Image: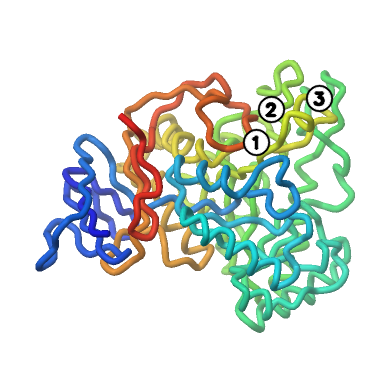
Amino acid sequence: MNIIIKNGRVIDPANQIDATQDLYIANGKIASLGFAPHGFAADEVIDATGLVVAPGLVDLSARLREPGYEYKATLESEMQAAVQGGVTSLVCPPDTDPVLDEPGLVEMLKHRARGLNQANVHPLGALTAGLKGEALTEMAELTEAGCIGFAQAEEPVRDTTVLQRALQYAQTFGYTVWLRPQDAWIGRGGVAHSGPLASRLGLSGVPVMAETIAMYTIFELMRATGARVHLCRLSSAAAIELVRAAKKEGLRLSCDVGAHHLHLTDADIGFFDPNARMTPPLRSQRDRDAIRAAVLDGTVDAVCSDHTPVDDDEKLLPFAEASPGATGLELLLSLTLRWADEHAHGQCADPLARALARVTCDAARIAGLSAGTLGQGMPADVVVFDPAARWKVEASALASQGKHTPFLGYELTGQVRATVVGGHIAFRRPH
């Protein structure tokens, strides 16, 4: 299908483009920007007057719940949520049931996702068999099956010798290891940030040092092995400072934060709101402010949705018993724009472009994907959105099967009008 997206403000941070231009799509690729290719005839025209045209969003952490947790969400519902939120490429952690530690499971997931013809799914393979932290998986075979890296999801590797071997193996073959730094013992069983609020509410705490102790270990192993590591969903000011120092030292390191950690603090737990139960937990205002500043200066490379759909039976419980997690695919764009509006505005010349970079080209670079840019010849993954449109976060407005988010009732700006994936219109909002 040949598509023209007309009269939109094209923002492509990867190529430093911010101008009102027409975008031409042919044969599933970006054909040109600003002028029609020779002999181009449009099958479809999208009028983007007053709208922003940007690369499709790349989400570095989206649980699709298949296989094994279809009662929480299905591939169909979550892929619809992705394109409705402008997300065209998503990385899914391996903590499904069964765990993504066999090539056949990865191939099945990729095949199912391709059949839906919506967003592009890029699985992470399990670093260890069954995520048990004992035996390494067949990383080469999992890579051939379509894995873009290896992770432990929320399961720490208790045996540092196993983690060392995993990093040695990954370094040999040029794989990236994705780790969420969390000490196996400190804060185990904790449900909220260790601080005055958790003490007042009588909730067991997860101290910041559970994150930083794990990071010291990871950095020592990186120095010994030379491996490339991506740290997932950092939550504290102390963690940000360690990343800053490690990058200055030259370690092959990148990191991301969850979009809700850009805005919320442990105070948003309020009166034990289970929707605010997260992993890692929402932390103090100081931590939140440090994360906001680090996204601006590039210490934090990317923002992800940390999309974790949870069903009513596991969420509508007392805070400490509720399953952690929130739906996020449809909020990623709006929450990133809100960060640009509240924090980057006035601190950098192009806050909107800076915000979009963190969820497009920067995220794609971390994952090693040909995505996140509108360069000529690149896959035609495009989002068209109205940056000024306001919408209210309500369960009925969400396509995801997971309806739980701490932002329920909030009014956010930034609404997706159309999402193009691989040159076909995967989502178009009715007027």
- Residue 79 on image: x %, y %: 53, 48
Report the mark closest to the observer, 2 or 3. Answer: 3
In the rendered structure, are the residues bearing label 2 and label 1 in contact, judged by CB atoms less than 8 Å apart?
yes
Q: Nearer the viewer, residue 64 or 21?
A: 64
Could you tell me the amino acid type at mark 1?
Ala
Residue drawn at 64 percent across, 35 percent down: 402
Q: How many C-alpha atoms fall within 10 Å of the one at disc 3: few (<14), some, or many (≥20)?
A: some
Q: How many marks?
A: 3
Which residue is disc 1 drawn over? 326
* Color encoding of the figure: rainbow
Left or right, residue 166 beside residue 412: right
Which residue is disc 2 drawn over? 275
- Residue 172 on image: x %, y %: 66, 83
Q: Nearer the viewer, residue 335 or 142?
A: 142
- Residue 89 on image: x %, y %: 48, 56
Dot 2 or dot 1: first in sequence order is 2
Report the disc number at residue 257: none
170 above or below 2? Answer: below
Which residue is disc 3 drawn over? 317
Q: Nearer the viewer, residue 23 or 192?
A: 23
Cα distance in 3D space between marks 3 and 1: 14 Å
Can residue 251 be seen here? The reply is: no
Dot 2 or dot 3: first in sequence order is 2
- Please state, as top left, top right, bottom left or bottom right, where the C terminus lies in the image: top left
56 above or below 265? Answer: below
